[in-house]
Image (cartoon, rainbow, N blue to C red):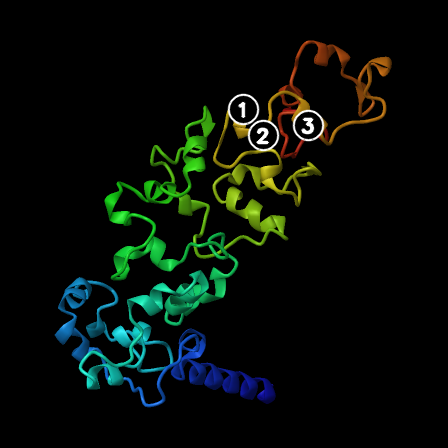
């Protein structure tokens, strides 16, 4: 146990030491050996417009928010140590607009997550990681340079902000059967965490998102539907909207018959399923869930009848 505590302490010291030395973010640049951190006060003397921008923001230097484990805060957290720049009257080395603008999405994310360390643990698994999207593209109202997305403050609600990029989803929210997102009954982040992805190797994580609201489907049931237990809700349902009832991926019995098909299911054998003839029902255009209504599971009937 003492060895584990010692190891954890050494790792923590090493982590803080890496941040103080520039960490993974500043290591992308050739920082002069004589450059030192001097604080943000001198920056505002020349960069008045930027200083005014930050006056009432969460990033204002006076708030004293520093990179964890260091005293590096304010302008220098992103632009690097400013002593050379100040000593040479604004002509010396600093990470300026062109330097930061040349960063790729991962580099821009690294700049932000050196402080927002809780997001650093999850960002690399998010749906936005690996694309051209990075922090400033959505949070442009928190930084003093542009981004791809219009600021959230220009929209009535969060959903409209997300849909400026996710235009295909906006069309799905206008289908006859849909989640009531455009109507304001729920928001994108009720299901999606923009900074963290879902472990698609574990369907329970996906189902858990749906079952947070659809609690009646969670069970446990005496008779579990094998096609539901441990599987993904999206196998049968479209998450944003569908032209089919119950937001199903397709109408009619084709959805059920993708799994529930047997050798005896033919006109020669009276369309038998589970030892029961279904020809009369099928010819009458009945849907499977007209009878087997408890499709997620039942506490009373192994064939999921509503009784």
Q: Secondary structure at mark 3?
A: helix
Q: Earlier in the sequence, mark 3 or mark 2?
A: 2
Horizontal relation, residue 66 to residue 241: left or right? left
Q: Position of residue 113 (x, y in %)?
A: 40, 68
- Is residue 101 or residue 304 the one in the foreground? 101
Q: Give the alpha-carbon distance from disc 2 to disc 1, as whole Å.
A: 7 Å
Q: Position of residue 65 (x, y in %)?
A: 28, 74
Q: Is residue 88 above or below residue 307?
A: below
At a point 22% along the width and 73% down the height, the residue shown is 61
Q: Position of residue 147 (x, y in %)?
A: 32, 54
Q: Circle 1 is placed at which residue position?
A: 244
Q: Are marks 2 and 1 in contact (CB under 8 Å)?
A: yes
- Is residue 154 or residue 224 the one in the foreground? 154
- Is residue 207 or residue 257 the one in the foreground? 257
Q: Are marks 3 and 1 in contact (CB under 8 Å)?
A: no
Q: Circle 2 is placed at which residue position?
A: 249
Mark 2, Cα crowd under 10 Å, few <14 / some 14-19 / many 20+, is some
Mark linked to residue 256: 3
At a point 20% along the width and 86% down the height, the residue shown is 87
Mark 3, Cα crowd under 10 Å, few <14 / some 14-19 / many 20+, is some
Q: Secondary structure at mark 2?
A: loop
Closer to viewer: mark 3 or mark 2: 2
Q: Position of residue 256 (x, y in %)?
A: 68, 27
- Is residue 246 or residue 275 the one in the foreground? 246
Q: Secondary structure at mark 1?
A: loop
Q: Give the alpha-carbon distance from disc 3 to disc 1, as whole Å.
A: 14 Å
Q: Is residue 74 visible?
A: no
Q: Earlier in the sequence, mark 2 or mark 1?
A: 1
Mark 1, Cα crowd under 10 Å, few <14 / some 14-19 / many 20+, is some
The quadrant of the image that shows the N terminus is bottom right
Q: Earlier in the sequence, mark 3 or mark 1?
A: 1
């Amino acid at each position: 146990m003492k060895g584990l505590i010692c190891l954890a302490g050494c790792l923590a010291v090493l982590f803080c030491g890496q941040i103080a030395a520039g960490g993974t973010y500043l290591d992308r640049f050739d920082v002069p050996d004589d450059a030192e951190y001097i604080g943000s006060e001198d920056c505002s003397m020349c960069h008045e417009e930027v200083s005014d921008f930050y006056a009432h923001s969460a990033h204002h230097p006076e708030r004293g928010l520093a990179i964890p484990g260091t005293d590096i805060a304010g302008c220098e957290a992103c632009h690097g140590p400013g002593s050379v720049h100040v000593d040479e009257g604004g002509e010396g080395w600093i990470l300026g607009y062109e330097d930061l603008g040349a960063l790729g999405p991962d580099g821009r994310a690294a700049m932000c997550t050196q402080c927002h360390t809780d997001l650093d643990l999850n960002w690399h698994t998010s749906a936005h990681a690996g694309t051209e999207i990075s922090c400033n593209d959505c949070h442009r109202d928190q930084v003093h340079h542009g981004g791809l997305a219009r600021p959230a403050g220009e929209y009535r609600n969060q959903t409209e902000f997300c849909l400026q990029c996710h235009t295909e989803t906006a069309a799905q929210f206008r289908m006859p059967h849909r989640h009531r997102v455009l109507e304001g009954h729920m928001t994108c982040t009720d299901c999606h965490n923009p900074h963290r992805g879902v472990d698609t190797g574990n369907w329970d994580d996906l189902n858990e998102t749906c079952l947070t609201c659809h609690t009646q489907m969670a069970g446990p049931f005496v008779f579990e539907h094998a096609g539901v237990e441990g599987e993904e809700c999206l196998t049968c349902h479209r998450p944003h909207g569908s032209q089919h009832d119950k937001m199903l991926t397709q109408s009619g019995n084709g959805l059920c018959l993708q799994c529930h098909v047997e050798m005896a299911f033919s006109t020669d054998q009276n369309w038998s399923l589970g030892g029961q003839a279904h020809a009369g029902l099928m010819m009458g255009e009945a849907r499977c869930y007209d009878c087997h209504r408890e499709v997620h599971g039942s506490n009373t009937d192994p064939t999921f009848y509503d009784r």
